[in-house]
Amino acid sequence: MDGYSALDRLDLKILAILQADGRITNQALAQQVALSASACLARVRRLEADGLIQGYHARLDIERIRPTVTVYGEVTLKSHRPADLLAFEAVLAEIPEVVEAAQVSGSFDYLIKVVAPDVRAWGELADRLLQEGLGVDKIASHILMKDAKPYRGTPVTPAPSRP
């Protein structure tokens, strides 16, 4: 599939419904989009095969499971060579406490989201990133006080028409 240009309104509706409720049965999904169960399942399987549906996940309330602190870290690297960026990203991928990481533009290079048992554990992880020869220049920490709007999905709407 060549991206969003090949998606029709039914595909978009299916994606929006599955994003809101990944546990919906195929039968219920088919009813909501006015397709037969087999036609709906074929579309879902195509969307999965094309990589538009990347997985189904349970959203956990980690605070009710164990004590945690969530930290957003602004990471600035000393070098912006592609090999250095890839090396840093490879290390992040191996740290389970780093639950999200994005390379960004602006005054720092990466925004990382870390879920650690406590502030001390975050400090140890930050020190490790600074000391492991990864070329990290500095890390600015922001402790999550309240998740004012938790991630619930991305709006799925048709792309604007191009002239």
Image (cartoon, rainbow, N blue to C red):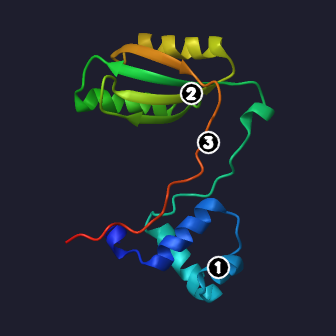
Q: Which mark is residue 119?
A: none
Give the image quarter of residue 19: bottom right
Q: First in sequence: mark 1 or mark 3?
A: 1
Please name the residue shown 34% across and 23% down the image: 108
Residue 97 horizontal/vertical position (percent)? 59, 28
- The residues tagged by marks 2 and 1 sit, at their Cα atoms, a distance apart of 37 Å
Vertical side of 119 occupied by 156: above or below: below
Please name the residue shown 46% across and 77% down the image: 9
Residue 87 horizontal/vertical position (percent)? 35, 29
Vertical side of 139 occupied by 48: above or below: below
Q: Which mark is residue 32?
A: 1
- Cβ–Cβ under 8 Å for marks 2 and 1: no
Vertical side of 119 occupied by 93: above or below: below
Along the line of sight, which residue is nearer the eye, 64 or 146?
Answer: 146
Identify the residue at the far left of this view: 163
Along the line of sight, which residue is nearer the eye, 20 or 80?
Answer: 20
Which amino acid type corresponds to the residue marked 1 in the rendered image?
Gln
Give the image quarter of residue 26: bottom right
Tag 1: Cα neighbours inside 10 Å, few (<14), some, or many (≥20)? few
Q: Which mark is residue 150?
A: 3
Provide the secondary structure element on which disc 1 rests.
Answer: helix
- Single out the mark in the foreground, 2 or 1: 1
Q: First in sequence: mark 2 or mark 3?
A: 2
Which amino acid type corresponds to the residue marked 3 in the rendered image?
Pro
Which amino acid type corresponds to the residue marked 2 in the rendered image?
Val
Residue of label 2? 114
Please name the residue shown 78% across and 28% down the image: 66
